Image (spheres, grey):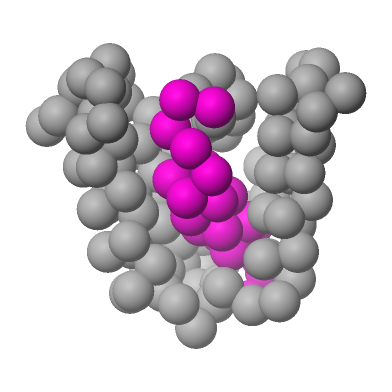
Amino acid sequence: MTGSKSAPSQPSSDAGTDKVTEDFDHEGFWTKARRVATRAGHEVIEKALWLYYAAQSPTTPAWARSVIYGALAYFVLPMDAIPDLIPVVGFTDDLGALAAAIATVSMYIDDDVREKAKNTMARWFSRE
């Protein structure tokens, strides 16, 4: 993981954006994602980024954003069903929550979302 990158700004509110979107802790997401990127591994971080960027898309409806932000909130919260500090299995519950959300909103994870996630991961996991 290299340098500190600032998080993208929260999307502007529209009629389709509900309170869940407004209450989501964007900075908390970016802080935890950067902090645990190496320990959680590529798969967990990639899935979290897919969801995050899908939620930012103006074509993603409010119901899908609610699903996404629910899964990302579980990822960010310090209290998990399986604590993240447990080696090997610590992030399995997070991956399960992210995978369930991805299965639910997969139609909104398009090539643009995957490209943004790929670019972020390249910055975080590149070796200098």
Instruction: Report the residue at 78% width, 21% height from top.
Output: 2
Instruction: Report the residue at 50% width, 73% height from top.
Output: 61
Q: Is residue 57 above or below residue 68?
A: below
Q: Foreground residue, 25 or 120?
A: 120
Main secondary structure of the magenta stretch: helix
- The image quarter in which residue 121 lies: top right
- Furthest residue toward bottom: 107
- Furthest residue toward left: 81
Magenta part of the chain:
38-59
Q: Quadrant of the C terminus?
A: top right
- Asked whether residue 17 is in view, the answer is yes
74 relative to 5 in the view: left or right: left
Magenta segment includes 44: yes
Report the number of numbered marks. Answer: 0
- Furthest residue toward right: 128
Q: Is residue 76 above or below residue 15?
A: above
- The image quarter in which residue 6 lies: top right
Instruction: Report the residue at 27% width, 31% height from top.
Output: 88
* Residue 105 horizontal/vertical position (percent): 41, 74
* Residue 101 horizontal/vertical position (percent): 33, 63
Q: Foreground residue, 56 or 96?
A: 96
- Asked whether residue 14 is in view, the answer is no
* Residue 67 horizontal/vertical position (percent): 34, 60
Q: Is residue 123 above or below residue 14?
A: above
* Residue 35 horizontal/vertical position (percent): 54, 18
Q: Foreground residue, 96 or 59?
A: 96
Q: Quadrant of the N terminus?
A: top right
Magenta segment includes 52: yes
